[in-house]
Image (cartoon, rainbow, N blue to C red):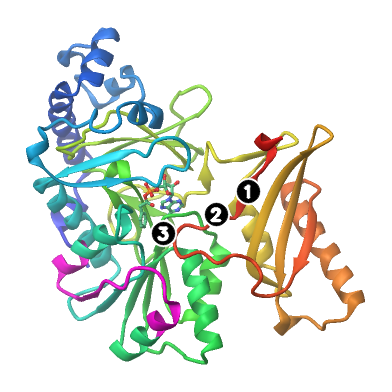
Amino acid sequence: MFWDKKIETLKPADLQDLQLRRLKKTLHQVQNVEFYRNRLNSAGLKNTAIKTLDDIQKIPFTKKQDLRDGYPFGFFAVPLKKIVRIHTTSGTTGKPTVVGYTRKDLDTWANLIARNMTMIGISEDDVFQNMVNYGMFTGGLGFHYGAEKIGMAVIPSATGNTRRQIEMIRDFGVTTIHCTPSYAMHLSEVAEEMDITLDSLKTGIFGAEPWSETMRHTLEARLGVTAYDSYGLSELFGPGVAFECPERNGLHIWHDCYLVEIIDPKTGERVSDGERGELVVTPLVKEAMPLLRYRTGDVTMLMEDGCLCSRSKKIQRITGRSDDMLVIRGINVFPSQIEHVLLKIPEVGNQFMVYIDRINHLDEMTVDVEINRGYFSGELADLAKLQKKVVKELHDVLELRTTVKLVEPGSLPRFEGKAKRVIDRRGDM
Ligand code: DLL
């Protein structure tokens, strides 16, 4: 199950040769970007300063804020007439980040997506429903063209109208779906309400936000799919950067296209394989918008063990972002940890919202969580017991006291794209 076997299974020495050649080309390409010309000049780095892959550590990091400051086209390394597509990130704070693609970039990107889908056995025999936003978000068009390249039947259903989505899966015999894990959860709830079992489904590709192993099991049981994790970010084309193989134990990140470093987010120093830190990537194949040592903000580690599939080093599933990690009364909390705890308690549903407030100078975390009627008696005494149980389980994992409110099933917001389950109101006070 290889799209490009030679490249996907390159021996380490050959891979390093290729990476170094591509890195040098990238360094040449960034000279077209004023930001990088100035950066490299002021760091005293001539082109000849980078002789080995390790020399890359001499180059300063590029941060998301740098890209924002370059709004809109400051990071383009080719004239606008060579750009054939523009995407932007959602930009939760400040200006969105703009990403440009040349024709060659779009082809490279589609090939990467095809690599990922082929790796998990998807072929031209499949019927693929792409249930993500088709606008500025890279997940829609990114997967669309990769899937078409393989030759399967692609249904560009995008988001919304969940009942219609479910009917299409049933009526068109859809075998593979792609969406955020939160939308997959919602889809499974609506399918249950409609009393429809989605028998044709085999594979679920889920990504664009962190999700836990518990969530994987829940989605697999409810939708009857094998669920795969897909990772990417707009600045590195979009989806397709890293993907699980059938082992489903870590994601293969494509080292021929992305030079990977893991750093301690505080010191900026590299950490060893097997140690957790922030993922920093230098893309090696981007034409329109080359980047050097881009800090993704995502927390992961390079895994030490090889993989049965003979592809190269994997990264661990992303546990969250170093920058949206919550610090509550000094304790670091990833929203994915909260989800992990809640999904293990059958009496509560899989929908929750977290609110963080500062009351009398103290951080307070409130978790609203839906009751699961199927598992819950409805007795008031049991309600109090359940509430205590959720508080305790959260405390055991987070080492943090929380206020838990049990709410009616169906009363919390549902999400079509990335879920926004944490509302930090501390800044509002
Ligand atoms: O989310 C691209 C994408 C689309 C990936 C579809 C996978 C599937 P952005 O909107 O730029 O791009 O957001 C990128 O989302 O830095 C991570 O913090 C987070 N993220 C993406 N995939 C995963 C994942 C797309 N599998 C940001 N696990 C990244 C955890 C993820 N977080």
Q: Marks 2 and 1, Cα distance to the nearest angstrom?
A: 8 Å
Other residues around mark 1 within 10 Å, as few (<14) / some (14–19) / many (≥20): few
- Say which amino acid is labelled 2: Lys
Judging by the rendered image, the residue that carries numbered circle 1 is 423
Q: Mark number for residue 420?
A: 2
Q: Are marks 1 and 3 in contact (CB under 8 Å)?
A: no
Residue interval drawn in magenta: 146-166
- Say which amino acid is labelled 3: Gly
- Residue 48: % across, % down: 15, 14
Other residues around mark 3 within 10 Å, as few (<14) / some (14–19) / many (≥20): many
Point out the tag, 1 or 3, that comes first from the N-terminus: 3
The residue under the point 70% across, 45% down is: 356
Judging by the rendered image, the residue that carries numbered circle 3 is 207
Q: Mark number for residue 20?
A: none
The residue under the point 77% across, 59% down is: 393
Asked whether residue 17 appears in the rendered view, the answer is: yes
